[in-house]
Image: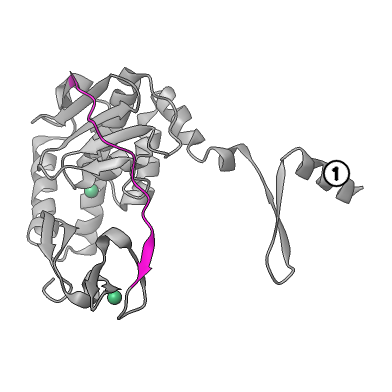
Amino acid sequence: MLFKTLLRDVLVGCYGLFSNNTGGIWVIQITDNLLNPRKKIQELLLKKDTAQVLEMAGMLHGHYCVGLALGVKAVEVGFTRLGISDNTGMEEIMAVVECNNCFVDGIQFASGCSLGNNALVYKDLGKTAVTFYRRGSDEAVRLCVKSFEIKTGSKEEQKEAQELFDKAVKRREKLSVVESKRLKVLSIQRSFAVIRQPDEDVFTISECDVPGLSFAPIFDSQECCVCAEKVMETKAGFRNGKPICRTCSQEEFHMVLGSGITSGNAVRV
Ligand SMILES: [Zn+2]
Ligand SMILES: [Zn+2]
C-alpha cells in the first residue's frame, strides 16, 4: 500500500526517484520550496517585512551592519517600483552594482541576483549604488545611498559604535570579548533602524535607461597542458600549441579584491 502511494506520488511529480550507478536509490520529496527556493524571501518582500529578510541575510554576510541593511532595503524599494516579485536566478532580473562592499551582500541575498548566477554585474565605480531591471522591459531603477543620519541611539552610542568599528575594521585591532559583543549589539540596532527610515532619507532614487547587457555566454573548457585542470577556453593561453591556464603561465589576470578590480598574477598576489 505504501509502495503504491509512493508510486502514485512519483507519477504525479510529488517525489523524485534517483539512482546512482552502484544501484543505490533515494527519494526526494519535491516540495514547493525546492521548486522555488526563494519563495519565503519573495513573500516577505511582498509583505514589506524587510526586517525579516535582513535577519536572514545575516546568514550569508556573517554579521549585521548598515551596509547589509541598505542592500536589503534597496531590493525592497527597487523591486516594488518595478513590480518584481519573483526571480529564478536565470538572468531575467538583473542587478548592476557599483561597489563591492557589505551593501552587495544585501543585494545578492534579497534580490537573488548573484555573482554565481551572472545576474549581478559589478561596475568598479566605488559608489554604494545599484540598478535593477527585468530583461525585456524598458524600465530600470537606480538607487544610490545618500549621506544620512541613522535615527537611533544617543550621540554617545553613535560615537562608541564608530570607535569600535574603526578599531576592528580600519585598524584591524583585536577587540576584547566585551567590545566585540558591544559592537555587534550597536550594529544590530543601527541596521534594523536603517531599514525603517523613509526610503528618500537614505537613497537617491531615479529611473534610468536599461543597461544593454547580453546573457552570460557559455564556453567550452579545455585542459591545461601543465596542471591538467579544466579551464574556460576564453581564459586559456597557449604554450607550444597546447592550452595553458594563467596560473601555470603566470600571465596576468583580473581579480576582485577589496580595493576593486585589480590585475596581477598567481605569484605576485
Ligand atoms: Zn557588513
Ligand atoms: Zn594549469
**Which residue is rendered at x = 78% and y = 41% of the image?**
11
Residue 121 visible, this orientation: yes
Please provide percent x and percent y for residue 177: 24, 63
Q: Can you say whether 17 is above or below 113 in the image?
A: below
Look at the image and tell me whether residue 198 can be seen.
no
* Point 26% across, 71% down: residue: 245
Q: Give the quarter the ligand 2 occupies.
A: bottom left
Disc 1 is placed on an element classified as helix
Q: Which residues are magenta?
A: 206-223
Q: Is residue 215 magenta?
A: yes
**Left or right, residue 192 beside residue 123:** right
* Residue sticking out furthest to the bottom: 226
Q: Residue at x 13, y 71 (%)?
A: 269
- Left or right: where does residue 59 sit relative to residue 247? right
Q: Quadrant of residue 22?
A: bottom right
The correct choice, above or below, for 256 with respect to 80 in the image is: below
On the image, numbered disc 1 is attached to which residue? 5
Question: Could you tell me residue 35's position as x and y percent?
Answer: 57, 39
The rendered magenta stretch, by its main secondary structure, is classed as loop
